[in-house]
């Protein structure tokens, strides 16, 4: 059976759960229903599906796998920051426009509708909501999309393994990233305003 039509190692029950999500919006809703956890882990989609909790990297990998089951390429994009952590999102394309699925400890860094003509547009849609706990706007670069199918040969069980999948995160760190703004511009950015700061922390969890 061709890989695109296979079960990707998921059980029939797991496949039914993923197929029931139906659309990218359904995948995002599944992630929104999961608790955010702040742990030094890199769980596979199977482990996320079982535990019903994830942080941004695990959620993006889960979303990419779910999109693959639904017939989309399993694409990730890395948003790189200074004085802050990176944010990883699963991206998809509909009618020539890009959208994204994501989970974050910050309310503004999640789903994006497929309305963006380019990946730069999509990345920039996260800029105003991307700040650290000092209120500094920290997003600086974005990567090209990474198709996780590239790992099928070296790590054929990446979607279902019980081991951590740190090799995906390591690859995202190693690939080139495109700068979003010149350093001179970055030096004069203002901090986020108090209301946006408060809104972005809605549901924020420092632990667990």
Image (cartoon, rainbow, N blue to C red):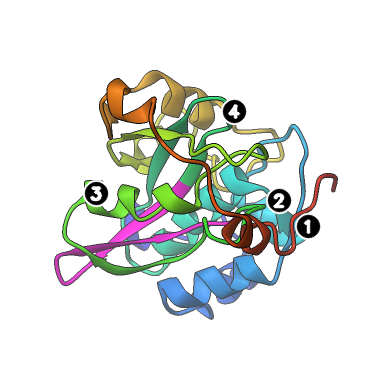
Q: Position of residue 33 (x, y in %)?
A: 69, 72
Whether residues under marks 4 and 1 lie with C-beta atoms below 8 angstroms apart, the answer is: no
Q: Disc 1 and disc 2: Cα gap in Å?
A: 6 Å
Identify the residue at horizontal 71%, vertical 51% (top origin): 47
Q: Disc 2 and disc 3: Cα gap in Å?
A: 29 Å
Q: Position of residue 160 (x, y in %)?
A: 61, 47
Q: Which residues are magenta?
A: 89-103
Q: Is residue 164 magenta?
A: no
Total marks placed: 4
**Who comes first in sequence, dot 4 or dot 3?**
3
**Who comes first in sequence, dot 2 or dot 3?**
2
- Residue lying furthest top in this view? 174
Whether residues under marks 1 and 2 lie with C-beta atoms below 8 angstroms apart, the answer is: yes
Whether residues under marks 1 and 3 lie with C-beta atoms below 8 angstroms apart, the answer is: no
Residue picked out by circle 2: 47
Q: Secondary structure at mark 3?
A: helix
Please give the label number shown on residue 51: 1
Residue picked out by circle 3: 119
Q: With 91 as the anchor, is 129 left or right in this view?
A: right
């Amino acid at each position: 059976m061709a890989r695109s039509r296979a079960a990707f190692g998921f059980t029939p029950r797991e496949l039914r759960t993923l197929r029931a999500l139906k659309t990218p919006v359904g995948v995002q809703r599944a992630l929104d229903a999961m608790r955010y956890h702040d742990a030094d882990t890199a769980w596979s989609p199977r482990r996320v599906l079982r535990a019903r909790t994830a942080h941004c990297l695990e959620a993006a990998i889960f979303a990419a796998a779910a999109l693959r089951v639904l017939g989309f390429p399993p694409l990730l994009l890395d948003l790189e920051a200074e004085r802050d952590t990176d944010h990883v999102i699963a991206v998809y394309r509909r009618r020539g426009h890009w959208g994204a699925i994501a989970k974050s400890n910050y309310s503004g860094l999640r789903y994006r509708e497929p309305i963006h003509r380019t990946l730069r547009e999509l990345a920039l849609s996260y800029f105003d909501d991307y700040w650290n706990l000092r209120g500094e706007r920290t997003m600086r670069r974005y990567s090209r999309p990474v198709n996780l199918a590239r790992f099928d040969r070296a790590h054929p069980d990446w979607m279902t393994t019980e081991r951590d999948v740190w090799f995906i995160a390591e690859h995202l760190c190693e690939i080139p990233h495109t700068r979003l703004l010149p350093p001179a511009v970055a030096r004069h950015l203002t901090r986020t305003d108090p209301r946006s700061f408060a809104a972005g922390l809605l549901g924020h969890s420092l632990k667990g």
